[in-house]
């Protein structure tokens, strides 16, 4: 029988609705990040750098691009006959068939996959965080405390603690209380959604809670293990960790990559971030172009000016175009004389000549003020913006738009133009 000490289960089925039009056709873990990567590359790279060679990736929402990106796991050296990476979508069963209804329910539906490796420990991960962590160090901590469950935690400002699952610990690091998004948090140690379970503890909890609607780790499994008197410990992590679940945090995390000394370093030889690399030509930077403090992807042609921005692969920035503080994903065309400031433009979009994005008053978005905020102008994938239009802040544009869609050639701040039918 196959025997693995620890396998990883990577939850990558989330819709990521707070990323708005960026996730209308793609799962959040498959969203582009840092010019050449996708968000899921970070936890997958952590696995292989930590010596974990068996990873189940649980997909559900819009999985096609994620599946294509992962393939058979070659970039992460996870193309193995035994173990490796396996994509685990919901599947039809002889009895009741259902979608994954919660994080723990998704793991429960894949008990047979985990059992086939007879693991001692199971590592549960989210597929939508940007960080580097050696899970082997966390496993050593788990073993040294003879724990049933280890939860990775990190200190957060006390005033933000009510947004997280909070743990209270004793002097030995054992968890004495677990609070799910408490109104009055008793500590500032926030759960990162990274867990190590002994296989016996996880299996028992999942089987016991299998009938629980929307079974979730934070709400159901962790409290169950605690109530059973199991040993739960907190593994404190103090490195860089970013939940890129909102457009603001996504934009910020990208912009932090271009700091003179970036807090999150993509260039460390001992902890590489691996990704699927397409075979494309090198960049072309013309003589009249200007580039300042930016990342420019392979196959990109720059004839205009780029300042403090992340530019993906295969992008064309035509003469006279100016891009500031923006994220441009792969295969986008920016027309002559266009001006973009604090814009996020998704893949395969076209920005018309002399169009202006991201200027005007900072007015809240009328349709989804909690999503389209932070003063950003967001353009969905495969969109077309005609020439000579102005688009304000806190805006969202999708689909192939035409001049008639812009009264007086303008889409004011806080407005939404949805020609793809995905914003509602």
Image (spheres, rainbow, N blue to C red):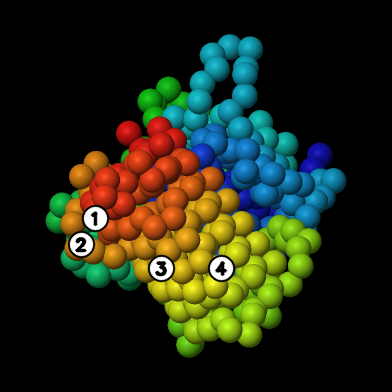
Q: Secondary structure at mark 2?
A: loop
Q: Where residue 58 sits: x, y (%)?
A: 58, 40
For residue 173, side relative to residue 347 (left or right): left
Of the 4 image quadrants, the one containing the N terminus is: top right
Image marks 1 and 4: residues in contact by CB distance under 8 Å: no
Q: Determine which residue is flagged by label 2.
A: 362
Image marks 2 and 4: residues in contact by CB distance under 8 Å: no
Q: Is residue 365 above or below residue 422?
A: below
Pick the residue in front: 386 or 214: 386
Image marks 3 and 4: residues in contact by CB distance under 8 Å: no
Q: Earlier in the sequence, mark 3 or mark 4?
A: 4
Which quarter of the figure has residue 32? bottom right
At 64% from the left edge and 80% from the top edge, which residue is drawn? 286
Q: Which mark is residue 317?
A: 4
At 23% from the left edge and 64% from the top edge, which residue is drawn? 360
Disc 1 from disc 4: Cα separation:
24 Å
For residue 13, side relative to residue 158 (left or right): right
Q: From this viewpoint, which residue is outermost toward the right?
A: 81
Q: Earlier in the sequence, mark 2 or mark 4?
A: 4
Disc 2 from disc 4: Cα separation:
26 Å
Q: Determine which residue is flagged by label 1.
A: 413
At 79% from the left edge and 43% from the top edge, which residue is drawn? 2
């Amino acid at each position: 029988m196959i025997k693995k000490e620890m396998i990883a289960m990577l939850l990558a089925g989330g819709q990521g609705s707070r990323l708005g039009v960026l996730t209308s056709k793609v799962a959040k873990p498959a969203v582009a990040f840092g010019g050449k990567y996708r968000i899921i590359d970070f936890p997958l790279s952590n696995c292989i750098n930590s010596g974990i060679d068996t990873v189940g990736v649980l997909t559900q929402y819009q999985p096609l691009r994620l599946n294509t990106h992962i393939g058979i796991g070659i970039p992460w050296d996870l193309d193995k006959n035994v173990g490796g990476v396996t994509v685990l979508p919901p599947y039809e069963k002889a009895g009741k068939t259902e979608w994954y209804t919660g994080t723990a329910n998704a793991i429960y539906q894949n008990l047979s996959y985990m059992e086939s490796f007879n693991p001692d420990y199971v590592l549960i991960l989210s597929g939508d965080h940007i960080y580097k962590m050696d899970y082997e160090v966390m496993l050593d901590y788990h073993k040294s405390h003879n724990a049933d469950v280890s939860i990775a935690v990190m200190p957060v400002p006390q005033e933000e603690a009510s947004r997280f699952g909070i743990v209270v610990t004793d002097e030995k690091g054992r968890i004495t209380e677990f609070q799910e998004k408490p109104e009055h948090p008793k500590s500032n140690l926030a759960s990162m959604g990274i867990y190590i379970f002994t296989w016996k503890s996880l299996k028992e909890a999942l089987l016991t809670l299998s009938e629980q609607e929307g079974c979730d780790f934070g709400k159901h499994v962790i409290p169950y293990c605690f109530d059973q008197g199991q040993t739960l410990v907190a593994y404190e992590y103090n490195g860089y960790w970013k939940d890129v679940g909102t457009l603001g945090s996504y934009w910020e995390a990208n912009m932090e990559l271009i700091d003179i000394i970036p807090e999150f370093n993509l260039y460390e030889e001992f902890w590489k971030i691996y990704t699927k690399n397409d075979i494309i030509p090198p960049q072309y930077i013309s003589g009249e172009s200007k580039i300042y403090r930016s990342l420019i992807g392979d196959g990109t042609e720059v004839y205009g000016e780029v300042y403090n921005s992340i530019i993906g692969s295969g992008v064309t920035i035509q003469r006279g175009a100016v891009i500031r503080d923006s994220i441009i994903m792969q295969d986008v065309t920016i027309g002559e004389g266009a001006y973009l400031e604090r814009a996020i433009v998704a893949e395969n979009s076209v920005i018309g000549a002399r169009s202006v994005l991201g200027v005007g008053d900072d007015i809240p978005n009328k349709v989804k003020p909690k999503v389209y905020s932070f003063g950003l102008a967001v353009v969905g994938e495969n969109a077309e913006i005609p020439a000579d239009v102005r688009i304000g802040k806190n805006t969202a544009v999708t689909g192939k738009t035409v001049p008639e869609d812009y009264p007086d050639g303008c889409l004011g701040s806080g407005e939404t133009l949805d020609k793809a039918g995905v914003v509602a």
